Image (cartoon, helix red, strand yellow):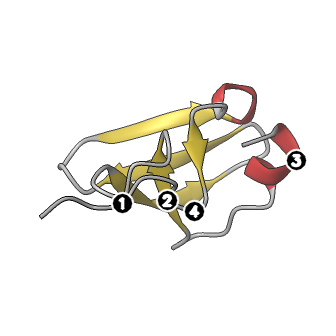
Amino acid sequence: MTVSESKGLKKGSRVYWRGDANDSGRITETSWDAVTIAWDNGQVATVHHGDMREIQRMPTKRATV
């Protein structure tokens, strides 16, 4: 996503790493320069708005069962 899209994220928004439905998380914090993502795999990451290129709002790859 772009910097402006990242800055528009709200707490609780779901995001996807490279659009993969199996690799998602929720926004837990937002600030002027970054967001914090609690990934479903248990990891937590703070990502600057300019580094959100590989994170998407919608999945582009289907979940595998």
Contact check, label 1 and label 4, Cβ < 8 Å = no
- Inspect the image, locate mark 1, and give the three-letter code of the amino acid beneath it: Arg
- Inspect the image, locate mark 3, and give the three-letter code of the amino acid beneath it: Ser
Q: Which dot marks residue 59? A: 2
Residue at point 72%, 43% (across, down): 1
In the rendered image, residue 46, in percent from the top left (x then y), is placed at 49, 36
Query: Which residue is disc 3 drawn over?
Result: 4
Query: Which residue is disc 4 drawn over?
Result: 58
Query: Which residue is disc 1 drawn over?
Result: 62
Front-lying residue, 22 or 49? 22
Contact check, label 2 and label 1, Cβ < 8 Å = yes
Between the residue at mark 2 and the residue at mark 1, the CA separation in whole angstroms equals: 7 Å
Between the residue at mark 3 and the residue at mark 1, the CA separation in whole angstroms equals: 26 Å
Q: Secondary structure at mark 4?
A: loop
- Inspect the image, locate mark 4, and give the three-letter code of the amino acid beneath it: Met
Q: Is residue 43 above or below residue 38?
A: above
Please state if 17 lies on the left or on the right of 54 as rendered: left
Q: Secondary structure at mark 3?
A: helix
